Image (cartoon, rainbow, N blue to C red):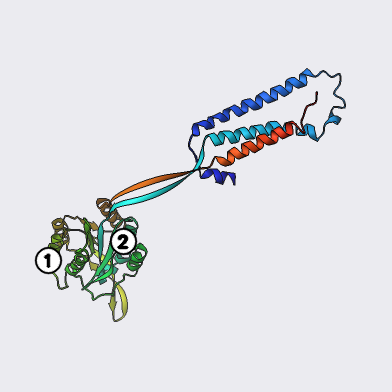
Amino acid sequence: MIFDYFSNITFGQPWLLLLFVIIPFLIYWKFNQGKKQVAAIGVSSIKGLSDARSWKNSVQQLPFILRIIAFICIILALARPQTKFDQTHTEGEGIDIILCIDVSGSMTAQDFTPNRMEAAKKVAENFVDNRPNDRIGVVIFAGESFTQCPLTTDYTFLKYQISQIRNGLLEDGTAIGSGLATGVDRLRTSKAKSKVIILLTDGVNNGGLIDPNTAMEIAKTFKIKVYTIGVGTDGYAPTPVSTPLGIVMQNQKVSIDEKLLQNIATQTGGKYFRATDNRSLEKIYSDINKLEKSKVEISTYHRYTEKFYPFIFAAMALLLIEIILKYTLFKKFP
């Protein structure tokens, strides 16, 4: 209990705790005084002295012990024990970010663990955890696009919406232009000084009503930076395919329009990345996290509460008890 109390205590003048070094000298001095007094008493025999011991003899050092404890309390009081309460105030501006995720059928390919889509969802959730000062939203796209979650700082709700992403929610296909345009539309009215889209896809644009280059020009107009990520191994990847006999695994060629993704990133001031496995995908999001830092100022205020009063009262009480014992129970008569 005492250790728990002192675990929350700091000292305003900790250097005064050095006075504790005096206590061993006081004990040593008291011990030597006792030996001198015994040596000064001449007796022909110690027989019978053991019978003379009483409860008063066994507690004759009590006043000195009380004085030492009182001295300890005084030292602690002089060192000014106090509790500290920290109050943190955060000021600054975050970044508005849209995670634009491909949910087409090819995202179920299992060249990632367990597949591309689940890997993308996991790194997206981790990315959210590392952006405590930003508004983040999610757009999904396949043959069409849809806002899975608008810009928000409710990260619990946001992560839940990410977890609900799956294949089959939208018409199949890869409408990169529509996905990018929907992301731009979500950021169009944003007042943030920095607006970012992270567009992740594993294919080639083959659908949608908006051309990717048109969506790119709109992003440039609204000063939205686009980071693009191409997902998939080189060559072929095992992909579940529906057949009359059920779901079978087939090796399908990985086709990513890297030239388009590079151009979108370059034209908008972003950067293109290629992810070929889970580890590289995690590193990409980590790199983007480092590139897009929020401007936040944190001010910490300290408030102290003095806690020396109990030690003062304890020292006074102990000294009073010592005086009472000295002039009553341990009073020396001439």
Q: From what the image shows, is residue 100 above or below residue 37? A: below
Q: Tell me the residue at 77%/18% (across/down).
A: 40
Q: Tell me the residue at 60%/34% (across/down).
A: 72
Q: Are marks 2 and 1 in contact (CB under 8 Å)?
A: no
| Residue type at tag 1 | Thr
Q: From what the image shows, is residue 327 above or below residue 101? A: above
Residue designated by label 2: 124
Residue designated by label 1: 214
Check disc 2 and report its element: helix, strand or loop: helix
User: Is 226 on the left or on the right of 83, as rendered?
Assistant: left
Measured in 3D between alpha carbons, the distance from the residue under mark 2 to the one under mark 1, in whole angstroms, is 26 Å
Q: Nearer the viewer, residue 253 or 89?
A: 89
User: Is 59 on the left or on the right of 176, as rendered?
Assistant: right
Quarter of the rendering containing residue 274: bottom left
Quarter of the rendering containing residue 99: bottom left
Quarter of the rendering containing residue 21: top right
Coordinates of residue 65 in the picture (x, y in percent): 68, 33
Q: Nearer the viewer, residue 323 or 277?
A: 323
Mark 1 packing: few (<14 Cα in 10 Å), some, or many (20+)?
Answer: some
| Residue type at tag 2 | Ala
User: Is 51 on the left or on the right of 194, as rendered?
Assistant: right
Coordinates of residue 131 in the picture (x, y in percent): 31, 56
Coordinates of residue 229 in the picture (x, y in percent): 23, 60
Residue 64 in view here: yes
Q: Earlier in the sequence, mark 2 or mark 1?
A: 2
Residue 232 in view here: no
Check disc 1 and report its element: helix, strand or loop: helix
Quadrant showing the C terminus: top right
Q: From what the image shows, is residue 275 above or below residue 8? A: below
